[in-house]
Image (cartoon, rainbow, N blue to C red):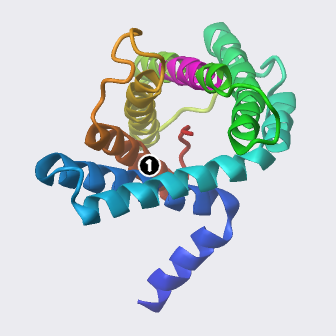
Amino acid sequence: MAEAVSTVVSVLESYRGRDRMIRTLCYSCQLIGGVITQKHGEKQQCGQSLLLVASQLSHCRTVLRLFDDLSMLAYSLQYGLGKKEKDCLIRWISVLGNICDQLYYPCEHMAWAADAGVIRIKSDKWWIASTALWGLSLTVGIIRSLRTLIKLQRSKGKHSEDDPPKSRGEIKFQMRSELLCIISCLSDLVNAIHWLPPGFLWGGRSPTWLVGLMGTISSAIGIYQTAVGGSSAGV
């Protein structure tokens, strides 16, 4: 029990760990609140309270992301043009993904500042721009993981002089990690398209509980991959 509490505290003391926990709680509240309000009506107090909590947690994450630009920039500069990446396709789609992620933050900051009354402009176009960049980044992530999966499938039992041979367990672990990344990105992409203007695919059509479900799936995968040392993307 004490070890479990210590682990949770350790996660919450790190910025990324706390963000993942807030994200999971946010979408879980949205899922449960959406189910309750759909079943019992919008006047159901418990459902509305959960949706209010989800809204506040989402706003909390938006404010915290005001400080993410520099860390993203440091990562982008470290990766550069991906000269160390041997696969040309993965290299350039990774660069494209980094550009999308880098541009996402200032667009969201402008939208937040407009809604908060810090600057006197309409926030709509900035929210659309940030959501579109997020959706593009997720699409790039899906392509990258699919490409990596194909390469791992082909590499079974094969290796070059530059690469040490990988065990079946290592390949299986990497393939599972990439598959989870695809599921996570697809879940978030469903929500990203929902938040785009009506008329674009299913923009604005997803029920609240579905938005919560997709976000909860993505968040749960993120927490799992953090625990096992993997990686996942998600806003």
Secondary structure under the numbered disc 1 in the rendered image: helix
Q: Position of residue 142 (x, y in %)?
A: 48, 21
Residue 91's place in the image compared with 49, above or below, is above
Quarter of the picture holding the C terminus: top right
Question: Which SS type dominates the magenta stretch?
Answer: helix
Q: Does residue 43 show up magenta in the picture?
A: no
> Residue shown at 40%/25% (left/top)?
194
Seen from this angle, which residue lies furthest bottom? 2
Seen from this angle, which residue lies furthest left? 39
Residue 214's place in the image compared with 55, above or below, is above
Task: Tell me where residue 133 sits by quadrant.
Answer: top right
In the rendered structure, the answer to whether residue 91 lies left or right of residue 176 reads: right
Give the residue type at disc 1: Ser
Magenta residues, as a range?
Answer: 130-142
Quarter of the picture holding the N terminus: bottom left
Asked if residue 162 shows in the view, the reply is no
Q: In the depicted view, which residue is nearer to us: 11 or 36?
A: 36
> Residue shown at 80%/28% (left/top)?
79
User: Where is mark 1, residue-wise?
Assistant: 219
> Residue shown at 13%/54% (left/top)?
40
Q: Position of residue 169 (x, y in %)?
A: 40, 43
